[in-house]
Image (spheres, rainbow, N blue to C red):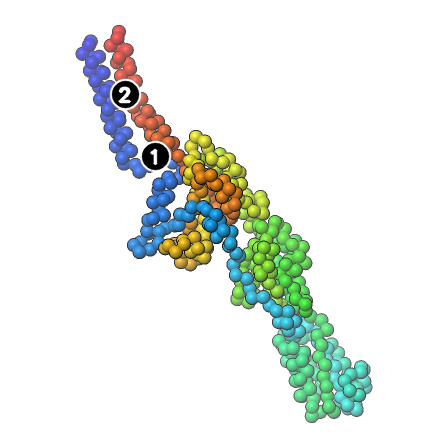
Amino acid sequence: MDQQISGSRNGNRWSLWLAMAGCVGFLSACSTLPSSGPSPARIREGARTQVNPGEAPRYQLVPISRQVIDVVASRSSPGSLPDATTEAVSHRSQVITAGDTVEVTIYESGGGLFGGATSEGPGRGSGTRLPSQVVDRTGEITVPYAGRIPVRGRTPHAVEDEITARLKEKAIDPQVVVAISEHKGGDLVTVSGDARNPTQVRVTLAGTRLLDAIAECGGSTGRAEETRVTLVRGKQVRRFLLSDLFHYPSHNAMLEPGDTILLSLQPRSYLAFGATGKNGQFPFDAAGLSLAQAMARSGGLLDGRATPSAVYLYRHESARIARRLAHGQKSTADRGTTAVIYHLDLHQPEGFFLAQQFPMQDGDLIFFPNAGSVGVMKFLELINAITAPGRSGLSTAASVERL
């Protein structure tokens, strides 16, 4: 009986040692324990790792400081279109286009071809006002004794000169006045998309700016900070938020006839993962949102899991911002956007002040990694789960031995 008990106890001890050896082998085969994301050490290592020799690292790891906040806050919307001058807009508004209604009045000295005065005009001659004509697709109008006159794309003054030249040998000292009595599209811009009243807006001689046209359509159906404005002018396209037109007056461009404006709603949101109260996607619900506010909305850091010294914000920055953040070091930025991970250390006394000043962007991702102690606890739990059968066997053997 004693031999059986002793054998059972030795067998359980061997089982325990085998279980522990298997646990060690398992841990050595696995690089990490189960986790919601990379550890701070892996994030730091990745910022130094090159995809190919001689190239910049895969992303930039940037500690958040007051200087970094100044760089991030200095961003501007994509380049604005060249601002059309009032003179240029006025000139284009005076160009005759298809659909316009044109009036021609011809004056000559002492009667003649256009006798029977209908209006008083230059000098002492008589004048005849021809019936109004709508410029058709051919872009021409008809003038007696002068024939078909091309007018589309020309100013009234240029048309006057041509008609005068054609009548010079037929009328007595002819003088011509051409006027656009009604525009039918030559001075319009189109506002469409998520505008309250999509329509065409007339460009005035004094000049019409982008905000003027949007206001005339009733504005956007959503908030300004969530409305993207696309301005198309020929082959040029510019996109920026409606709120940027207030913050950056240079983007409130003077419109030109033929411009197209598209308003599109794009609700902004950010993601939160890791050791926080609530993982998921969260809307901005405000014109401006700081990192501190975003952290609070996701439930903040979990006391039992998170480490205040390691809060990371993932973002794709423009190449211009990334180069400024690099401070002369090799940047991941070449063109377009580049990956940047911002590091917030809340163990520092000013950490929360920095979090209050750091502005969030649409599509940001906040990651709260587990503290190192959480990994230790998981390791101990794993050891306990593997060795529990062996320890139970030893306890049973000891109990039997006492009997």
Q: In front here: 37 or 177?
A: 37
In the image, what residue occupies the spot 45% across and 46% down? 64
Residue 338 in picture, x, y percent from top left: 42, 53
Question: Circle 1 is placed at which residue position?
Answer: 33
Q: Residue at x 27, y 17 (%)?
A: 393
- In the image shown, does 335 or 296 lie closer to the viewer? 296
Q: In which quarter of the image is the N terminus?
A: top left
> Could you tell me the amino acid type at mark 1?
Leu
Q: Mark 2 points at which residue?
A: 390
Task: Determine crowd level at label 2: few under 14, some 14-19, many 20+ residues with C-alpha closer than 10 A.
Answer: many
What percent of the width, then of the height, locates residue 258?
Answer: 61, 67
Which label belongs to residue 278? Answer: none
Work out which quarter of the rendered image holds the C terminus and state it. top left
Q: State how far apart marks 1 and 2 are (Cα).
A: 23 Å
Outermost residue to the left: 3
Compared with 152, 67 (above or below) is above
Label 2 residue SS: helix
Q: Position of residue 27 (x, y in %)?
A: 29, 33
Quarter of the view holding residue 247:
bottom right
Of badges 1 and 2, the one in the foreground is 1
In this image, 54 relative to 320: left or right? Answer: left
- Near mark 1 (Cα within 10 A), the count class, few <14, some 14-19 or many ≥20, is few
The answer to whether residue 245 is above or below residue 283 is: below
* Residue 397 picture quarter: top left
- The three-letter amino acid code for the residue at tag 2 is Gly
Q: What element carries label 1?
A: loop
As drawn, 173 above or below 96: below
The reply to whether residue 41 is visible in this rendering is: yes
Q: List x then y, in percent, for residue 86.
A: 64, 69
Q: Which badge, 1 or 2, comes first in the chain's sequence? A: 1
Instruction: Count how many numbered circles sit on residues in the image.
Output: 2
